[in-house]
Image (cartoon, grey):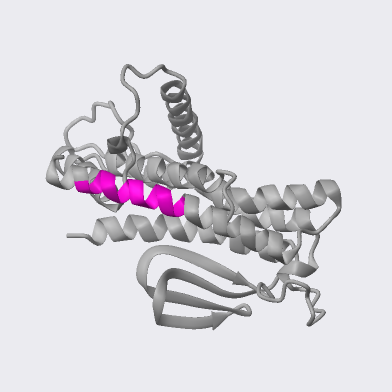
Amino acid sequence: IMLTFLGIIVLVIFVHELGHYLAARAMGVAVDSFSIGFGKVLLKKKMWGTEWRLSLLPFGGYIMPRGEQDYYNKEDDPESFWAVAPWRRGVIAVMGPVFNLLLPWPLYFMFLVGQPFPDVVVPDGAEPARIGVMDAAYYSHKISTNFYKKIWTAVNTPREQPMSIKDVGGPVAVYEFTENAKKRSQETGDWGFLVDWIVFFSINLGVINLLPIPVLDGGHIAMAGYETATRRKLSILARRRLNYVGLYLVGAIFVLAILSDASRLFGI
């Protein structure tokens, strides 16, 4: 029952972490491990100098850059995370959310290739024309840009009612939306409804991670920007204190999400 839900979670997390991984390699930083999930490692394989892992709890993921714990690069490793310039660390941080925000284009493209053209009457016995690569690229760009335009319009439209705790969705809300999209797709035979939901979920994850909160990607981007502008490296104590603040803020958001899920489950 939860396979679709877990599949979407894993896909969106993989895309996010892939952005970090590719950026790290491009910026000259080695990556020791790439994990989908947290906790006990279920499967692992070493490829391209990185250990690829599938862990027990699929609600998250991470990459472990080389030397992440060696803040002052005492090992003098040129491929260490802390050996590269701050702007390079900022690029590594930003590319995870960027990959989430760019997912609509390749996802719609893959969904559209080979599909019959919509709203075309096909004579009995005739084979319907299929969407080719060029048309799929054109339509995926058009759909993706329209999707962002709708989000922009929704964000800038004044709300009739103030936001409440029910507007903050947690895992239960994500599961419910996934099941609703899946059910609608099955009933209509149009799996575009499920693809639309994956796109929306991926964009949400990207936007949330860009918030300038320490421990989130946005926080790392802000700190890298500060170090680039001042040409001074934050002390490890200052970074730890900022991360503690970030943990409290993220924890508060998580509590709100759980309360929102509880109100949704029990009709409070």
**In the image: residue 178, left or right of residue 204:** left
Q: Is residue 8 visible?
A: yes
Give the camera-side residue of 43 and 209: 209
Q: Position of residue 240 (x, y in %)?
A: 64, 63
Q: Position of residue 265 (x, y in %)?
A: 16, 47
Give the camera-side residue of 72 and 100: 72
- Most common secondary structure along the magenta stretch: helix
Residue that protrudes farthest toward the right in the picture? 231
**Which residue: 74% across, 47% down?**
225
**Which residue: 66% across, 50% down?**
221
Q: Is residue 178 visible?
A: no
**In the image: residue 6, left or right of residue 247:** left
Q: Position of residue 239 (x, y in %)?
A: 67, 60
- Residue 67 magenta-highlighted: no
Count of labels shown? 0
Quarter of the picture holding the C terminus: top left
**In the image: residue 166, left or right of residue 74:** left
**Which residue: 40% across, 42% down?**
199
Give the camera-side residue of 253 and 187: 253
Q: Quadrant of residue 56?
A: bottom left
In this view, 149 is above or below 134: above
Give the camera-side residue of 107 and 58: 58
Q: Which residues are magenta?
A: 250-262
- Residue 256 magenta-highlighted: yes
Quarter of the picture holding the N terminus: bottom left
Q: Position of residue 158 (x, y in %)?
A: 41, 16
In this view, 19 is above or below 134: below
